[in-house]
Image (cartoon, helix red, strand yellow):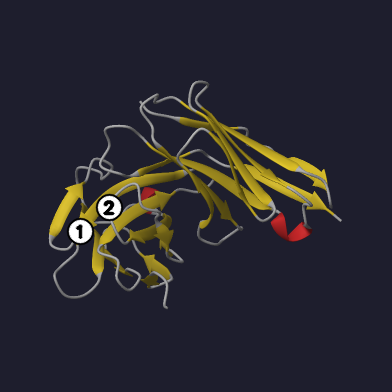
Amino acid sequence: QKEVEQNSGPLSVPEGAIASLNCTYSDRGSQSFFWYRQYSGKSPELIMSIYSNGDKEDGRFTAQLNKASQYVSLHIRDSQPSDSATYLCAVIAGGSQGNLIFGKGTKLSVKP
Amino acid sequence: NAGVMQNPRHLVRRRGQEARLRCSPMKGHSHVYWYRQLPEEGLKFMVYLQKENIIDESGMPKERFSAEFPKEGPSILRIQQVVRGDSAAYFCASSQQGPPETQYFGPGTRLLVL
């Protein structure tokens, strides 16, 4: 059973701080990794995709991938109350036809 | 450029009825994926389709569920003889190319079975 694990939280950070979200995955053959944000009652919205080891930055968001450790993270700089949401880690497992395997999500709360 | 469209946004059915959920992918996208999100659960893959073809249905329950993506028109997820356990949010996603292209999600259909 291919799995994606996330700490369910809630993760609470003060406004302006860095929020760090972590994810591990079980399938060593996984090649593609995504972070989605989901507000309550809404659909998932893509934040970042990452395919290679290392860091990828986009505005206030930085994704990090370490395939050897089967670990992917998302860091949000200068966190805002509007960043309060559930963050979903998703992986396309090796050998699959391309469906996303999602973690259960980490709930982030940014306090003003 | 319109995003992924799903309708209806909310659907109420009584046990034993049929539910039909529709998904129109983003313009230029020919790959459609259906996912289900049960209350307090993560998103689970159901089926992956291209026009007129089912590519992967490994996540579909063996009975009562079917999906299609005809040459013309939206993709349809059909649930026959619904039960209370089918109550969930059903999301459709689309991509322009196949994996590992990014999948963009529609607003979802919230199905409630009474």
Give the residue at x 32% y 58%: B15
A111 shown above or below A82: above
Question: Which amino acid, mark 2?
Answer: Gly
Q: Chain of mark 2?
A: B
Instruction: Check the image and report above or below for B36 versus B113.
Output: above
Q: Is residue B18 visible?
A: no
- Relative depth, front residue between A39 and A78: A78
The quadrant holding residue B11 is bottom left
The amino acid sitting under disc 1 is Gln
Q: Along the horizontal axis of the image, is A7 left or right of A69?
A: right
Nearer to me, B53 or A72: A72
Distance of label 2 from label 1 (alpha carbons): 9 Å
Q: Residues within 10 Å of mark 1 (few under 14, many from 20)?
A: many
Residue ID at (43%, 29%): A3
Q: Position of residue B52 (x, y in %)?
A: 12, 62
Say above or below: A1 vs B16: above
Q: Which residue is mark 2?
A: B98
- In this rendering, the count of numbered labels is 2
Q: Which residue is mark 1?
A: B50
Q: Quadrant of residue A65?
A: top right
Q: Position of residue A56 (x, y in %)?
A: 58, 44
The tag earlier along the polypeptide, 2 or 1, is 1
**Visible residue check, residue B47:** yes
Q: Are circles 2 and 1 on residues that touch, CB within 8 Å?
A: yes
Q: The C terminus of chain A lies in which quarter of the figure?
A: bottom right
